[in-house]
Image (tube, rainbow, N blue to C red):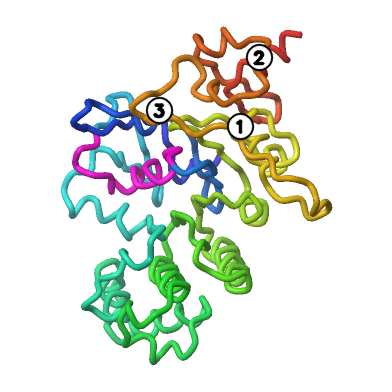
Amino acid sequence: MTKPLISVKDLTLRFKTDEGLVTAVNNVSFDIAPGEVLGLVGESGSGKSVTAKSLMMLNAENSVYDDNSSITLNVDDQDFDVLSLRRPKDQMIVRGGAISMIFQEPMASFAPAITIGDQMVEQLLIHSDMTAVQAKEVSIEMLTRVGIPVPAQRFGQYAFEFSGGMRQRAMIAMALSTKPRLLIADEPTTALDVTIQAQVIELMKDLVEEFHMSILFITHDLGVIAQTADRVAVMYLGNLVETGTVRQVINSPAHPYTRGLLNSLPKLDDLEAPLTPVPGDIPSPLDRPSGCVFHTRCVESSAIAEKCRTEIPGYTTDSANHQVACHLATQGEQS
């Protein structure tokens, strides 16, 4: 059996604040296999980006990882204990080496006083044995592949000379140019129009096939997930509430939160149908609900409301490895 490219076990992350320790990620576990695309979905504030940054040790200095937390990266049959990498030299394997990240905000990700091209060349010189000439050629080629016009000219320009969508594409080109084993894509198509979005998605699919690259794809867009991902993990308030294949999660959602996310999407076959949002708002991490973290917004649990308020649900896994953390799923198995 092929070893996972990266394995996350019991990841719990808290931040030190003036109000005390705030739990951002709670007991999260998942694997990503070589060449696999895992979609991570959930509302803003669910802990998706914090989870992704943990894989590269990029969270702020006030972050505290639980002693039981484990992140293991397997590259060329060598295991790296990511959370034990403390020196910048050791962290290069997860920061631009085997792992690259497309960040959510492209303007804040480029140095404003250095040209886009110089920044792309610099990271290639650090993480490969290319010459400066070779690095420039690769950089221009990647700018071309993500649909940036006159890439040789754009190579010498600054971030402020790019539109928002072009900055996003340039950042994607920069992340992909090192040909990482794992690409973390945090809302990579947010600033793009639909034609460029489709082009970028196709580019990612091609790279997965060409280089056997894995992707952790973070997005709010379940339509994009349906096109790109092999498996889906649904996150709510720092907890994974459901994981499974795309077909399992999209066609047979087992958690009320997943069903709520799907029901909130516009229905192209019924344009008159009203949108049905998930009721309420996601609670503050400072005031995490007891029991099931979703019980304050759940519209399906009235029959077992007390159990949902007081007991943390365990994971139920069916024969097809479709996993859900919900008391309603347990009730269904028992009945």
> Of the residues shown, which amino acid type is indicated by label 1?
Tyr
**Residue 50 drawn in magenta:** yes
Residue 182 visible within the image: no
3D distance between C-alphas at marks 2 and 1: 15 Å
- In this rendering, the label closer to the viewer, 1 or 3: 1
The residue that disc 3 covers is: 26
Q: Bounds of the magenta span?
A: 45-63
- In this rendering, the label closer to the viewer, 2 or 3: 2
72 lies above or below 189:
above
Quarter of the image where one finds residue 80: top left
Count of numbered circles on the image: 3
Q: Secondary structure at mark 2?
A: helix
Q: Residues within 10 Å of mark 2 (few under 14, many from 20)?
A: few
- In this rendering, the label closer to the viewer, 2 or 1: 2
Residue 4 visible within the image: yes
> Of the residues shown, which amino acid type is indicated by label 3?
Asn
Q: Quadrant of the C terminus?
A: top right
x, y percentage for residue 45?
Answer: 43, 40
